[in-house]
Image (cartoon, rainbow, N blue to C red):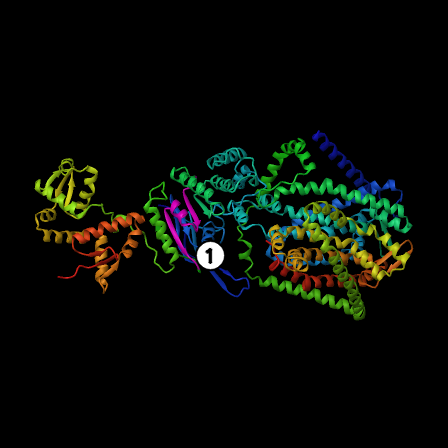
Amino acid sequence: MTELISTSHVTKSFVLPDGSDHYTVLQDISVSVKQGEVVALLGRSGCGKSTLLRILAGLIRPSSGDVVADGAQLSGPNPNVAMVFQSFALLPWLTVQENTELGLTARGVGKNQREEEALKAIKMVGLEGYESAYPRELSGGMRQRVGFARAFVMNPEVLMMDEPFSALDVLTAENLRGEIGELWEAGKFPAKSILLVTHNIEEAVTLADRVIILAANPGRVRGEVTVDIPRPRDHKAPRFKALVDHIYTIMTNPDVAVGELKPNEAKFPLLPHARAGGISGLLEVVFDHGGRDDLPQLAERLRLEVDDLLPIIDASVMMGFARVEQGDVILTPTGTEFAQADVARSHEIFGEQALTHIPILRTIVETLKQKKSGKAKADLFLDILDEYYSEKEAERQFETAIAWGRYGQILEYDSDEELITLPEAE
Amino acid sequence: MADAVVILGTLFLLYVAARTGSESLVKFHPPDLIPAVSLDPHNLPNYAARSTLRMFIALFASTIFTLIYGYIAAHSRRAEKVLVPLLDILQSVPVLGFLSVTVTGFIALFPGSLLGIEAASIFAIFTAQAWNMTFSFYQSLRTIPRELDEMARLYGLSRWEKFTRLEVPVSLIGLVWNGMMSFGGGWFFLAASEAISVLNHNYTLPGIGSYVAAAVTARDFSALGWAILTMVTLIVLIDIFFWRLLVAWADRFKLELTAGAVPRYWLLEMFRASRVPSLLSRLFSPLIRAADRIFSRLTPAVHAEPKIVREQRKDPIFDVVLIIAIACLVGAAIRFILKEVGLAEFGTAALLGLATMGRVIFLLAFSTLVWTPIGVAIGFNPRLARLAQPIVQVLASFPANFVFPFAIATFVAFHISINWGCILLMALGSQWYVLFNVIAGAQSIPNDLREMADSIGLKGWRRWRALIGPGIFGAWVTGAITASGGAWNASIVSEFVTWGNTSLAAVGLGAYIQRATSIGDWPRIVLGVGMMSLFVVGANRILWRRLYAIAEAKYRLT
C-alpha cells in the first residue's frame, strides 16, 4: 500500500515560558498512514497526540525529523489533508453553506461548482435543508456535521479528526461515529484514509484498522494493535470486547510491552460442552460399527438429535480420536486404541490426549507443576478465560476442562474449596 | 414601507453630510480671519451637524488606523516589539496637551484655509478614539481561538480571505464596543478643540464646542442651556441610529455558539425587512466577488507557524537597534532637561504633577466609594440595569466641559477654591467609567454564587469581602484605569478655567500646561506634557498592571 503521510524520528519540543528549559512533547516518532486504512492515535491527555496530528497536517513544524507527504518533504500546511476539529472551528458568521464552501473558495473554485459540491457534502452528512442556517442555530451534533461537510468537500487524501466526538454528548457522539463508520464501510467516504486522534478506546476499536498507542512525558509510540474485526463492527462481539480490554490493560499499565491480541482460536479454543463419558460411549459405538459411521444413522442409534451429537463429535475430533469426512465419523488409530482399551488404560489415553490437544488443560497442569504446593485456586484460570470469553462462557469452559482433566486423571478438583491439585503420585 | 423609510433616511443623511461638508471646504478663510460664532440657538442644528461630521470623519480615520496598525502589530514580530509599547504610551499621553503642537502643524499644512484647524480638531478627536480601538483589535487578533487559526491555515485561506472572513469578524464586537466608548470620549475633545487659543492666537471652528466657548465668554446661560439640550439630543440620536444599530448587527459575530435570545433591535429589523440592502448587495456582489478574488491572489497565504512557537526565536540585531534608539531618546531627554528648561523647572513640574496626582487619587477614591455600592445595586437588579445602562452611557459620553460654566459660576459665587473645585470638574467626566464598569462587573457575577451566598447567610461586610469585592475587582480596575486617564486629561482643562473675564487657576500640572500652551512657551509645553505622560505611564506600570495581573490570576470568574 502507498504511504500517504509518514514521519520518521520526529521530535517536538517547546521552550518553557521562562525560557529556561526545553519541554519535549514528542520524542522519536515514526508513524505512517497508508492508502485505504483508518489509523487511530490513542493516548491519554498530555501524550502529544494532537501535536503529532498537527505535525502530520503541516500545521506545526517538528523540531527535528522528517515529515513526508506524497513522497515529498512537507513544508507548510499539507494541501491533501482536511481536518475535523474538536471544537468544530466553524465561523459563526457564515452559514452552513458558506462554512462548507470556505476551503473551495480559498482554492479558487468557481461559484457554481463550489455550490454544487458543497450541497453534495451537506447532503452526505445529512444536513439537507439547513444550508442557510447559521451554526448558532444548530445543535452540537449538527455543528460537527458541518465540520465534516467542510472536510468532505475538499476530497482530501487523508481526513484528520482531532477528537471529533469528544465535545458531543454520549448519544450524539455514538450516532455520528456510527454514521462515519457506515460511510467508510460503504466505500462512500470522500477520503482515501482516515487519521483519528482520540482518547476513547471503544472509538478507536470501532473505527480503526490500526491503533497506535502513545505514551506520555515525553510523547512516544508504545506500539500498535491491529483491529482485525470485520466491519460493520458489533460492540457486543467477544472479539470486540477482548480487544477493548486488551488495549485498556496496555493503557493502564505503562510498563507492559504492547503486543497483538492473539486470535481466540489459537490460544484457548472454545471447548464443546461434551461429557467425557459421552465421548467414550460414542467412540465405542463407532468402533463396534467398524470404525466408520454415518452421522444421521449414528444419531438415530444413540437416540440423540444431530444437534446434541455435534458437540460430542467436535470434542472427539479436538482430542484427536476421530475425524469427520463426507458426513461420516472415522476413528483415528488413537481413537481405535481408546475404544479397545480396558478402563484404566482408557483413562490414561484420555489424559494424554487432553494434555496434547487442550491448551487450557496444559496451562493448568504446567502451572500446578511449577507451584511448590501443587495447588491452585480456580479463580486464577477463570481470570485467564475471562480475557477470551464472557464471564458465563468462561465458567462453562472451565467446568468442561476440569471434567475432562478429572476423567483423564491429570488433575483433581475440590469444588467446595475451588482448589485444583495434581493427582497424588502412586 | 420599510423600503421607503430606509431610502429616505439614507438620502437625508447624505444631504446633511454633503451640505455641512461643503461649508468647511468651500469657505476660504485666512487664518487671522476667525469665523464668528453666533449665539442664536437657530444656528445650533447646523453647528451640531458640523461637529458630528468631524466626529464621524475621526471615527472613520480611527477605524482605518486601527485595522492597519493592529494588523501589522499582530503579524510582524519586529513591529510588535515597537508598536505595542508605543501604543501603550500614546494611550497614556494627555492628548489635550498636544493640541498646540497639532494645531500649528496642521495650519502649516493647509495654509490660508480653515481646513488646517478642521484637521487639527479631527486629529484631536482621532487621538481620543484610535488607541483604544487599536488595542482592542490587536488583542482580538492575538486571541483568535487556535483551532480557527489552524482551520484557516489548513484550508489555505489567503491573507485577504483570512482578514475578511476570520480576523475582522472575530474582532468586530470588541471594536464596536470600544468605538462606542471612544466616540463618547471624543465629544470632550471636540468641545476642547473647536475653540482653542494657541500661541497667542484664538482659533475657532464653527461647531457646538465653539458655541459653548462663545457662550462662556458672553456669560450667556440660556445659550448654554440650548447647547446642552442639543448635545444630549445629539448623543441620544447617534446612539439610537448608529451605535445601537451597529451593536445589534455585530451580535452575529459572537464567537460563542451558545444559542441564546438574539437581541432584537427595531431599526435593524426594519433594515432586514427592507429590500433595499439585499437589492444593493445583489447589484454589487459580482463586483465584490471580483475584488475579493483579486485581493486573494495578491495576498497568498504565508506558511507561518503559530505565535507561541515563533516568539522563542532570538533576534539580536533588531534588539541592538532598539537599544540604541532608546539610548538616543533618553539622551535627548536628559539634554533637553539640562539645556532647555533647567533642573529647577523640572522639579517644579514634578511637584505640580504630584499635586494633580493627589487630585486624581482623591477623585478615584471618592467615585469608588460613591459609585461602587450604587453600581452593584444596579447590576444585581436586571430591570434597573437595563434602565440605567443607557443613561450612564449618555452621561459618560456627555462632554463634561459643557457643564463646567455652571460649576465655575458656583465656585465664583460661593468663593470655593479652584484647587478643590477642579476635582469636581475632573470628576464630572471621568467618574462614570467607574460606575459603568462596576455595573458590568456586578452583572457578571454568576447567579449560582449569589444564591450560594444567600444560602449560607453571607451578609453585609462579609458578603462584600467574600463575593462582591472579588467579583467586581477586575471590572473596577478597568474602570479606574479609564477614569484616571480621563481625569489626567481633564486636568488640563479643569485646573485653569475662565468664566467671562474671570480666570481661575489651580496649583497643578494641568494649569501649567494650559498656561504654557496659551502663551506658546514651547519648552514648558513639552516639559509639562512629558511630565504628565511620565506620571500616567508610571502609574500604569507600577500600580495598574499589577492590579490587572491580580485580577486576572486570582479574581477571574470564568
- Determine the image quadrant of residue B270: top right
Between residue B341 and residue B460, name the one nearer to us. B460
Q: Is residue B495 above or below residue A205?
A: below
How far across and down, in percent of the image, does residue B293 sit?
Answer: 58, 39
Assess disc 1: are there few (<14), some (14-19) or many (≥20) residues with their C-alpha within 10 Å of its C-alpha: some
Please report the residue visible at 50 percent of the width from the left and 65 percent of the height from the top. Answer: A21
Q: Position of residue B278 (x, y in %)?
A: 64, 33
* Vertical order, B268 against B80 (above or below): above
Position of residue A301 measured from the top left corner of the image (x, y, whole percent): 13, 37
**Residue lying farthest to the front in this orientation:** A416
Q: Amino acid at mark 1?
A: Gly
A252 within the magenta span:
no
Front position in the image: A231 or B24: A231
Question: Does residue A198 belong to the magenta stretch?
Answer: yes
Quadrant where the image shows the N terminus of chain B: top right
Depth check, front residue: B526 or B539: B539
Above-or-below relation of B351 to A288: below
State the residue lying farthest toward the top. B1
**Location of residue B323 by image quarter:** bottom right
| Circle 1 SS class | loop
| Chain of the residue displaying label 1 | A
The residue at 74%/50% (across/down) is: B126
Per the image, the residue denoted by label 1 is: A46
Q: Is residue B64 visible?
A: no
Examine the rendering and report whether any part of residue A175 can be seen.
yes
State how many labels appear. 1
Residue stretch rendered in magenta on the structure: A190-216
Q: Position of residue B37 (x, y in %)?
A: 88, 45
